[in-house]
Image (cartoon, grey):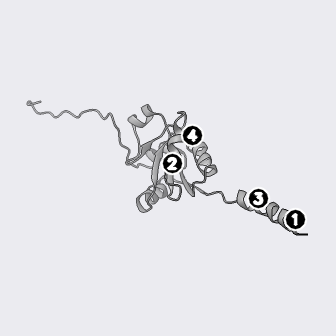
Amino acid sequence: MKNILILLSILLAVPLSAQKKGRLEKLDPKVFQVKTVHLKGTLLDVRNADEFKAEHLKGAKNVDWDNKSFKETAKKLPRYEPVFIYCQGGYRSNLAAEWLLEEGFSTVIVLDNGIDAWKDAGLPVEMLDAPVKKSNSSYD
């Protein structure tokens, strides 16, 4: 009887542990922006380095989903703080979000439709290789 109770408790515990997956949110750009300002977390741009240099959200860390070092780098992030994640249009960020949840991250917040939607909403982006603006001064 004791062995049956132990076996039964193990069988009941397995489905419960499988349900302990973190929370995934997909947000439109304006709500995403508000949450990144008001919640302590990590903002990840999962596009490649060239895409990141061309334009990215202020404060974002570039960790390329398609790079073999993504998983190693991402595992070092705090698991109990929100991870805000985006890519160009949403595909890579959704894949990365699912992986982060499988790895035990508690909250992953995806920018729905990526930086494209962010720009369409009229929100600001930054550039690493911004062209130098020349003045009309004759002293340049």
* Quadrant of the snapshot with the C terminus: top left
Q: Depth-wise, is mark 2 or mark 3 nearer the camera?
A: 3
Amino acid type, callout 1: Asn
Residue in the picture at 86% in, 68% down: 5
Residue picked out by circle 2: 85
Residue picked out by circle 3: 14
Q: Are marks 2 and 1 in contact (CB under 8 Å)?
A: no
The answer to which of marks 2 and 3 sits earlier in the sequence is 3
The answer to which of marks 1 and 3 sits earlier in the sequence is 1
Residue picked out by circle 1: 3
Q: Is residue 79 left or right of residue 130?
A: right
Q: Residue 136: x, y in percent?
A: 14, 33
Residue picked out by circle 4: 92
Instruction: Name the foreground residue: 68 vs 8.
Output: 8
Amino acid type, callout 4: Arg
Q: How many other residues sit within 10 Å of disc 1, few (<14), some (14-19) or many (≥20)? A: few
The answer to which of marks 4 and 1 sits earlier in the sequence is 1
Q: Is residue 122 left or right of residue 19?
A: left
Amino acid type, callout 3: Val
Q: Are marks 4 and 3 in contact (CB under 8 Å)?
A: no
Measured in 3D between alpha carbons, the distance from the residue under mark 2 to the one under mark 3, in whole angstroms, is 30 Å
Measured in 3D between alpha carbons, the distance from the residue under mark 4 to the one under mark 2, in whole angstroms, is 9 Å
